[in-house]
Image: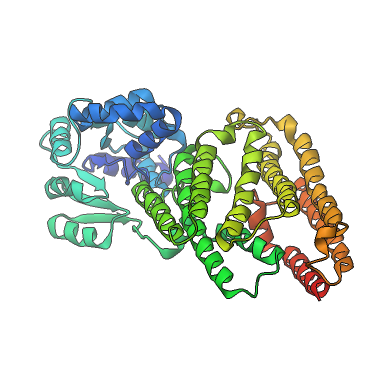
């Protein structure tokens, strides 16, 4: 036997002599909570079953988990696994160590995860009658392993009774306070990762960069030349804040309901909730609080603004749950969500929105909505995959989306040209002929955006693209100068 084979044999013998390793699931092996994931999937796919939850819970938490698992089919392959711990488990398994999955998750879910990971010799889980958590989990571990010692890997305070009884402890994504507590009651062998809730993660979760869309609230002020009115500016700022809070609430809800789809996406899989970097419970708490905060701000504005805000929020939820699966209706609603911001700005500042502005917005935002859907579909085509039919679009639709989106964008330049040539422009501009220079700017920006999208370099959100694009800033700057000159 050679040196390498001898060393390998020694490693195998050493790991086989190591005490069994018991590993928790939720928050440890996976950076999420499978029960919460299942409940969110239930809300998304079979919402009426939510009314049965109190009845299931009356028979105990174990019965609740079993019923939820029987109704929904969680995609275990897409879950955010703890890569560092998983590498360690795979190596220990190769070396012959006995590894047991010990979890409070429902047995069917736990078994499918164990089968997917492929390193566990046994699964101890909630069986529909007994909830395998805390002291109950410890009892099952002892029944399975007997009096021999074991090593336990977990992440929460509910595991303290197990750590008191184990030979060694492994802490996974544990907070500093828990680490100190466990060190006092057990021999901590490994610490895998560290649980941190950073401001950057929270900012990403509420999508602060998307607040730029709410600047459309100021468009009625700009179009009606009311930027010098301090009262209207203040109420518009207030409306902007209300929309930002409600939008962030809607974004979080969308992320919570779209976990599986986001995890299959090359960039969306890095979102805080999809990646498991933020706990789902935090999202479930933050979403209603943000909405109530925005609603509270709206009460200081006209009643119709509050109604407009509520319509926007309901429509956004409808889009997240249902409408985005309906081909073409999804892009119409996306365009409408942009337009509602313009309407809300007019309502808040008590400014009548002209038909010209409304039609201009409709065509521009429809082009942006189609650009977003085209970019998403382009990613699928470039990876030689089949499009998700649940979103309504096939890969064969990509050219048609491009044609419709480009045409809609060019219509914005036509509407602007008709407006410049109308009688409505004369009361607002001393030199309206200069406004003609904005038309080629619009044509340039639309054409360039679609060209970039066809090359596969467009972000799946055109607003995010515009924020990062220097040419977009140049176009906006030139348009501002032209409007200033035309105003006189």
Q: Is residue 17 left or right of residue 332?
A: left
Where is residue 145? Give x, y as percent.
Answer: 16, 33
x, y percent for residue 158: 19, 47
Residue at the image point whose x is 13% and y is 46% from the top: 161
Viewed as shown, does residue 79 lie left or right of 341? left
- Split into 4 quadrants, where in the image is the N terminus? top left
Q: Is residue 141 left or right of residue 381?
A: left
Farthest residue to the left: give it.
147
| Observer able to see residue 295 | yes
Identify the residue at the far top of this view. Answer: 70
Q: At x 63% / y 59%, what residue is drawn? A: 216
Residue nearest the observer in this picture, 349 or 386: 349
In the foreground, 12 or 287:
287
In the rendered image, the quadrant that contains the C terminus is bottom right
247 relative position to 334: left or right: left
Question: Residue at horizontal 64%, vertical 34%?
Answer: 329
Nearer to me, 237 or 429: 429
Q: Nearer the viewer, residue 323 or 153?
A: 323
Query: Residue 453 placed where, x, y %?
Result: 74, 48
Q: Is residue 261 visible in the rendered structure shown here?
A: no
The way the protein has been coloured in the rendering is rainbow
Q: Position of residue 103 (x, y in %)?
A: 26, 37
Q: Quadrant of residue 76?
A: top left
Total count of labels? 0
């Amino acid at each position: 036997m050679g040196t390498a084979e001898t060393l390998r044999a020694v490693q195998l013998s050493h790991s086989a002599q190591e005490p069994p390793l018991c590993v928790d699931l939720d928050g440890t092996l996976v950076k999420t909570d499978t029960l919460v994931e299942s409940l969110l999937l239930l809300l998304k796919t079979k919402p009426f079953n939510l009314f049965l939850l109190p009845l299931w819970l009356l028979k105990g938490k174990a019965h609740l988990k079993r019923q939820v698992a029987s109704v929904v089919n969680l995609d275990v392959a897409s879950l955010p696994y703890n890569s560092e711990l998983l590498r360690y488990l795979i190596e220990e398994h190769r070396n012959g160590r006995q590894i047991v999955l010990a979890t409070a998750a429902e047995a069917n879910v736990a078994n499918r995860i164990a089968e997917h990971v492929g390193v566990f010799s046994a699964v101890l889980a909630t069986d529909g009658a007994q909830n395998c958590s805390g002291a109950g989990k410890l009892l099952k571990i002892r029944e399975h392993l007997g009096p021999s010692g074991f090593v336990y890997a977990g992440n929460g305070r509910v595991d303290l009774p197990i750590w008191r009884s184990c030979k060694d402890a492994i802490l996974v994504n544990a907070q500093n306070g828990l680490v100190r507590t466990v060190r006092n009651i057990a021999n901590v062998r490994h610490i895998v990762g560290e649980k941190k809730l950073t401001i950057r993660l929270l900012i990403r979760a509420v999508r602060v960069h998307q607040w730029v869309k709410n600047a459309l609230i100021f468009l009625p002020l700009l179009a009606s030349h009311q930027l010098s009115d301090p009262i209207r500016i203040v109420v518009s700022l207030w409306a902007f804040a209300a929309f930002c809070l409600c939008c962030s609430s809607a974004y979080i809800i969308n992320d919570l309901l779209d976990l599986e789809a986001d995890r299959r996406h090359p960039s969306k899989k890095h979102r805080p909730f999809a990646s498991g970097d933020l706990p789902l419970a935090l999202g479930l708490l933050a979403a209603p609080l943000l909405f109530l905060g925005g609603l509270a701000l709206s009460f200081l504005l006209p009643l119709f603004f509050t109604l407009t805000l509520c319509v926007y929020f309901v429509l956004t939820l409808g889009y997240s749950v249902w409408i985005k699966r309906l081909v073409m209706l999804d892009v119409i609603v996306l365009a409408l969500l942009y337009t509602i911001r313009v309407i809300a700005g007019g309502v808040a500042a008590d400014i009548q929105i002209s038909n010209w502005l409304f039609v201009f917005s409709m065509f521009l935002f429809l082009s942006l909505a189609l650009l977003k859907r085209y970019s998403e579909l382009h990613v699928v085509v470039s990876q030689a995959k089949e499009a998700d039919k649940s979103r309504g679009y096939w890969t064969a639709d990509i050219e048609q989306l491009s044609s419709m989106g480009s045409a809609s964008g060019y219509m914005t330049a036509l509407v602007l040209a008709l407006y410049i040539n109308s009688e409505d422009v004369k009361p607002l501009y001393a030199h309206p002929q200069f406004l003609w220079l904005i038309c080629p700017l619009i044509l340039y920006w639309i054409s360039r955006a679609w060209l970039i999208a066809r090359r596969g370099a467009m972000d799946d959100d055109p607003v995010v693209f515009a924020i990062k694009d220097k040419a977009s800033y140049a176009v906006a700057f030139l348009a501002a100068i032209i409007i200033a000159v035309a105003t006189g």
